[in-house]
Amino acid sequence: MPAPDSGLKITATKLRQVLVLLAVHAGTTVRTDQLIDELWPSSPPQTVRTIVQTYVYQLRKLFARSFRAPDGKDLLSTDPDGYVLSVPRENIDLFQFQTLVDDGRGALREQRFGCAAEMLRSSLELWRGPIPADVTSGPRLRGLSVFLEEQRLEAVSLRIEADLASDRHLDVVGELRSLVATHPLHEVFHLRLMQALHGSGRRGEALYVYRELRSTLNKELGLEPSPEVRKVHQEILVGG
């Protein structure tokens, strides 16, 4: 984001929704109908397009007071279909998070485990709770929040995988127990807990985690653990 002249605080609910929707699509057009769907998922007012234009005008005024736009360009511009927030994606936490996760995943594939863990930790440090944590959400932002929570859980899983590959088994046991309790149907967390316990010399506990997962999956979903989880279970049985 361009350097601020002063703090930018937006308290109006719908104005915050507009800003968040524009920010998570920075550099691309957010169509007017998308904004309407987010703000008024049912029964939009008759003057809805005029109201949207008013919100955009208010944001422009706030930006003009708070930011120095580069090269005299408008931070918030209009095109034939909607509006574009022209902020570099690297200045938005969401895109920084996604870049770091992608880089961490790549380092993990290349077996640069310490580097992968560091990048994935950095990605998770950007997380400030469910997104958007302090914004009333319509259907589009609710969908985004669900998607991003899945990405966060994947980043956690990848970071733990990197830690295990660096022989930090004991260090992650407590965290994994908490994750398993919070996400009882998330097989990967159970798998990582089995690996962490076995790597810490706690074979019996690792086998108990498998039995608990199998029971939960069968009771809740009528399913057996995945082939990957069964393979690790067999390795623990054989490995002693």
Image (cartoon, helix red, strand yellow):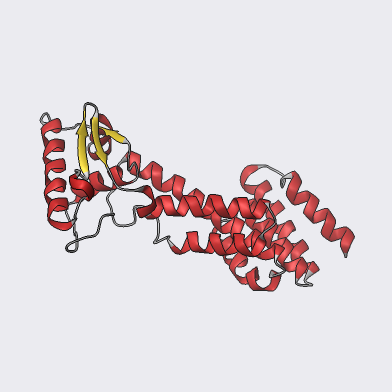
Relative depth, front residue between 200 and 110: 110
Q: Is residue 71 above or below residue 160?
A: above
Query: Looking at the figure, which quarter contains the C terminus?
Result: bottom right
> In the displayed structure, does residue 219 sit left or right of residue 24?
right
Any part of residue 198 in sight: yes
Q: Is residue 163 above or below residue 213?
A: below
Q: How far across and down, in percent of the image, does residue 86 sit?
A: 27, 43
Any part of residue 186 in sight: no
> In the displayed structure, does residue 90 sit left or right of residue 216?
left
Which quadrant would residue 81 be assigned to in this image?
top left
Q: Is residue 43 above or below residue 173?
A: above
Q: Residue at x 69, y 42 (%)?
A: 223
Q: How far across and down, in percent of the image, does residue 186 sit?
A: 60, 52
Relative depth, front residue between 189 and 157: 157
Which quadrant would residue 38 be assigned to in this image?
top left
| Farthest front residue in view | 71
| Farthest top residue in view | 80
Tag count in the figure? 0
Q: Residue at x 68, y 70 (%)?
A: 168
> In the displayed structure, does residue 220 sit left or right of residue 24?
right
Q: Residue at x 65, y 69 (%)?
A: 173
Q: How far across and down, in percent of the image, does residue 20 sit?
A: 29, 48
Query: Looking at the figure, which quarter contains the N terminus?
Result: bottom left
Q: Residue at x 55, y 52 (%)?
A: 103
Relative depth, front residue between 48 and 72: 72
Q: How far across and down, in percent of the image, does residue 162 sit?
A: 65, 61
